[in-house]
Amino acid sequence: MFEINELGLTLAHIGINCIDEAEALSGAETFASMLGETVKNGSSSVFAGKVVELMKKPFLGQHGHIAFSTENIDRAIEVLTANGFKFNASTAKRDEQGKIKAIYFENEICGFAVHLVQR
């Protein structure tokens, strides 16, 4: 078994599935007010600060998603795969050089999709 500290995983954000943009904006405004943060309205989601993302329409995960960041996503994928975790390759997002910057695990955990993001 590997040491989790080897991967440097930290909670990046929580994604909440909303029914539409109005619900996402309302939720983001409430969370932003609670956390003393600002609202950032994007194309598919609305962020309240950097830790709460409200999806404008349901996305992966029954309830939403949880994102963990790492300094070395390639190493994290390698170590987690070697320890029995599977990734959904079709969800990989890549940068301009073709390096993976985000990828979802194959299975949900308690109704949440989980993904890794490059820090």
Image (spheres, grey):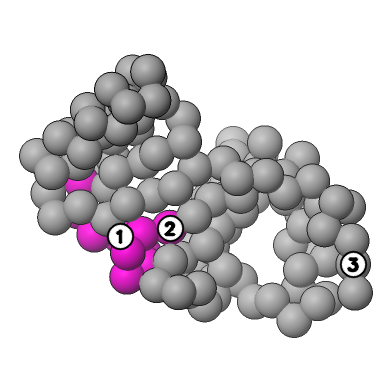
**Which callout, 1 or 3, points at the residue further toward the start of the chain?**
3
Residue furthest toward the front?
34
**In this orientation, does residue 99 appear?**
no
Contact between labelled residues 3 and 1, with CB atoms less than 8 Å apart: no
Out of 45 and 1, give the one closest to the viewer. Answer: 1
Distance from the alpha carbon under mark 1 to that under mark 3: 31 Å
Which amino acid, mark 1? Phe
In this rendering, the answer to whether 119 lies above or below 63 is: above
Q: Which mark is residue 59?
A: 1
Out of 94 and 79, give the one closest to the viewer. Answer: 79
Quadrant for residue 80, please give it: bottom right
Q: Main secondary structure of the magenta part?
A: loop
Q: Disc 2 marks which residue?
A: 65
Distance from the alpha carbon under mark 2 to that under mark 3: 24 Å
Residue at coordinates 32% horizontally, 52% vertically from top-left?
16
- x, y percent for residue 90: 49, 67
Start and end of the magenta stretch?
56-65
**Which callout, 2 or 1, points at the residue further toward the start of the chain?**
1
**Which callout, 2 or 3, points at the residue further toward the start of the chain?**
3
Which amino acid, mark 2? His
In this rendering, the answer to whether 52 lies above or below 61 is: above
Q: How many marks?
A: 3
Q: Disc 3 marks which residue?
A: 2
Dot 2: what SS? strand
Q: Single out the mark in the foreground, 2 or 1.
A: 2
